[in-house]
Image (cartoon, helix red, strand yellow):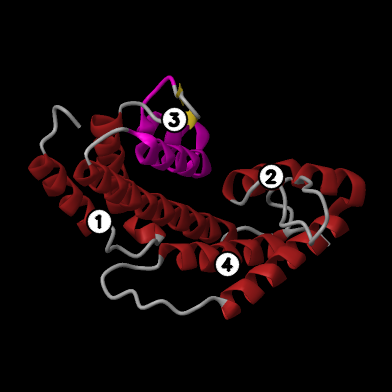
Amino acid sequence: MASLTQAELIKRAEKIREYQKLPPSGTERLHINRGRQLMYDLLKDVFGDPLIAPSKLYSGDWEMLFTNSGVDALMSAITLQQQAVQQKNIDEQQRKVELVLLKLATYTTNQVKAMLLDTGSDFLSMKNPGDISSEGMIRRLENDIGKGPTPPPGQAPFTWQIILEQQGQAGMRAWVAYEINVLEYQISNAPQKDEKEKINFEHAISKNKLSYLRQILRILPE
């Protein structure tokens, strides 16, 4: 933050906060992506390139990490940067400012993730069973949801690809339905937060993920 005054940082952060007031829907995509770009530019100016492992930097900036590796990789980099800030030998006021900035980055990244799920759900709503191949469906699930469903307690993680290979389309439908049930339970039992100034993007991620998976289940072949 040597070349960036605290006043400049606050001014840029306030502009980003205006974008964080937008609901994470596909109709706001251009505006939310602009807020994302401003956020990741600010992270670069304050912290340099993102960490992808302790003491290991990504060979590209924050925006490039998002473009090449996606939202989850960005969130991991933010977490690593938070840990690095906690361990740095810096003035406590500076530490506080940097941690607030990283918290804002978490809001933006969750906003983007929720928006992408909403956009993906809209795309799938226009498809019919058979319009997307099994391999295409798996790629979408891996990119938008994760490598595999939430494993039951005590069971090792597994991938959507393994489900398709070992259990076929019926297995895919069963596990998507299971993931839907898990999400419905989590949403119905989530504590209600009083969010007066900003949208609860973590809750929005869960709701949009649920909508996305319902569309997947609708178009999966019987």
Side (left or right) of 49 relative to 207: left
Reading the chain from its start, which is encountered first: label 1 or label 4?
Answer: 1
Q: What residue is shown at x 21% (from left), y 41% (from top)?
A: 94
**Mark carried by residue 147:** 2
Q: Position of residue 25 (x, y in %)?
A: 40, 62
**10 Å neighbourhood of mark 2: few (<14), some, or many (≥20)?**
some
Mark 3 or mark 2, whichever is nearer to me: 3
Q: Earlier in the sequence, mark 4 or mark 2?
A: 2
Residue found 40% across the figure and 68% down from its top: 200
* Three-letter amino acid code at the position of disc 4: Ser
Q: Nearer the viewer, residue 103 or 142?
A: 103
Q: Which residue is mark 1?
A: 19
Location of the C terminus (image quadrant):
bottom right
Q: Are marks 1 and 4 in contact (CB under 8 Å)?
A: no
Marker disc for residue 211: 4
The Cα atoms of the two marked residues, 3 and 4, are separated by: 32 Å
Q: Is residue 154 left or right of residue 2?
A: right
Disc 1 on helix, strand or loop?
helix
> How far apart are the alpha carbons under marks 3 and 2?
22 Å
Stretch of the chain drawn in magenta: 59-88
Tell me, yes or no, whether the two marked residues, 1 and 2, touch with CB atoms within 8 Å. no
Q: Secondary structure at mark 3?
A: strand
